[in-house]
Image (tube, rainbow, N blue to C red):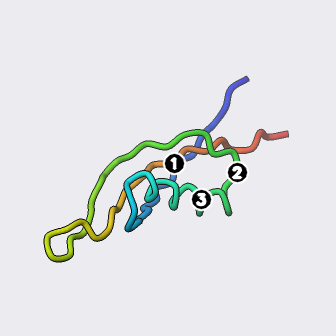
Amino acid sequence: MSKVYKKVELVGSSAESLEDAIQVALTRARRTLRNLDWFEVKEIRGSLADGYVNTYQVTLLVGFRLDDEE
């Protein structure tokens, strides 16, 4: 069976880690999107405070399957 996907770009941020920033974005996406199948990390950024990492920021492309037409 053929499938059609849509991609959305999300940015997650966390003071804890890159992995947590990814989870923050995916957790939010699950609240409004169905059929999430994959993600791709496009960019990694962060902010510094006094020369130390303050916040991690990750830009993701998230792919989800569109519902089948009936």
CA gap, disc 1 and disc 3: 12 Å
Could you tell whether 38 is left or right of 20 in the image? right
Observer-nearest of 53 and 9: 53
Could you tell whether 54 is left or right of 29 in the image? left
Mark 1 in CB contact with mark 2 (< 8 angstroms):
no
Q: Which residue is mark 2?
A: 34
Q: Nearer the observer, disc 1 or disc 3?
A: 3
Could you tell whether 11 is left or right of 54 in the image? right
Mark 3 neighbour density, 10 Å: few (under 14) some (14–19) many (20 or more):
few
At a point 27% along the width and 63% down the height, the residue shown is: 46
Amino acid on which the number 2 mark rests in the picture:
Arg
At a point 73% along the width and 23% down the height, the residue shown is: 1
Q: Which residue is mark 3?
A: 27
The picture places residue 11, in percent across and down from the top left corner, at 42, 62
Residue found at the far right of this picture: 70
At a point 43% along the width and 51% down the height, the residue shown is: 19
* Secondary structure of residue under mark 2: loop
